[in-house]
Amino acid sequence: SLQRSAFYPFKLQSSTPPRLRLIPGLLPSEEAYWTFSKLLAELPWSRKTNLQTGYINSEAYEEWLPCWYGEVPYTYARSTIDTNAQWHLLLVTLHSAVEKASDHRFNSLLCNLQWNSKHSIVWHSDDEATLVTQPIIASFSLGDKRAFSLRKQPPPEGDYSYMERLWIPRTHGILLMMERATQDDRQHSMAKEYHDRGPRINLTFCTMYPESYQRLQLSHWDILVESTLFLM
C-alpha cells in the first residue's frame, strides 16, 4: 500500500507507464476540516438521471451523491449530469490550489459524497469519450478515510481474481494524482467496508472537451497520417 508522499511508477514495458503521486498538505489541517463541512452543507448534491429513461437512478443514489462542474455534460454508467459553469467560490479556490500543487491545468470537476462505509464505487477507469488521451486525474479527499484500490486492466474475458492490485488509504486532505497511462492500464474502485465510516467527499479534477472536439482532433490526425504516407 502507499503511505507517504512520493512518485509511484508501475513497472510496465511502456514508453509512458502509469504513475501515481501522493501530495499531502494541500490545505492546513483546520482549513481542510472547515472546507469539508462547508462543501458538505452547501454543494447541490443530487441523484443521477438515467439517459435512456430520464428517471432518477436510485441504484447510483444508494452508492454516492454526485455534483458536477464543467461546460461539458458528465456521463457515466448510462447516466448523465448536465453542464454547470457556476462553480462554488470555495471550489474555485481549491481548483487553483490543485493546479498549483500538481502543475497541471483542469477545466472540470466531479464531486462525490459517500455517506458511510456501505457506499462504494465499482471498478472502472476514467476513460469517458470526452476526456483527452491518457488523461491526468487529480483526486482530492476530504473526510473519513476509505480504502482506494487499483488493479491492472483485465483482458476482455479474463479472470479478475489474479490481477495485480494496489491498496491506497485515502486519508483526509491528501491529493492523489493519476498520470500518464494509468487510465489505459489500470482500473480503480472503492469497496464497501464492514466497520463504520463517516461521510467522505472526493473532488476529481480533470480536463474534458466536447465529443465534437475529439472528432475534430481525430480528423486532423487522419489528415496528418495521410500526408505523411503521401510524402513517403
Image (cartoon, rainbow, N blue to C red):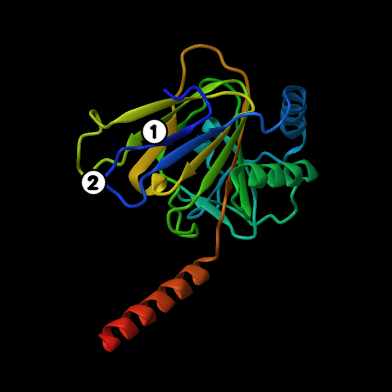
Of mark 1 and mark 2, the one earlier in the sequence is 1
The extreme top residue here reads: 195
Residue type at mark 2? Pro
Neighbours of disc 1 within 10 Å: few (<14), some (14-19), many (20+): many
Disc ID at residue 206: none
Neighbours of disc 2 within 10 Å: few (<14), some (14-19), many (20+): few
Question: Mark 2 falls on what kind of element?
Answer: loop
User: Marks 1 and 2, Cα distance to the nearest angstrom?
Assistant: 17 Å
The extreme bottom residue here reads: 230
Location of the N terminus (image quadrant):
top left
Q: Which residue: 43% across, 78% down?
A: 220
Closer to the observer: label 1 or label 2? 1
Q: Please provide percent x and percent y for residue 200.
A: 61, 26
Whether 105 is drawn above or below 45: the answer is: below
Q: Is residue 69 left or right of residue 55?
A: right
Q: Mark 2 — residue?
A: 156
Q: Which residue: 20% across, 39% down?
A: 158
Q: Which is more toward the observer, 22 or 183?
A: 22
Residue type at mark 1? Leu
Q: Mark 1 — residue?
A: 150
Q: Which residue: 28% across, 31% down?
A: 164
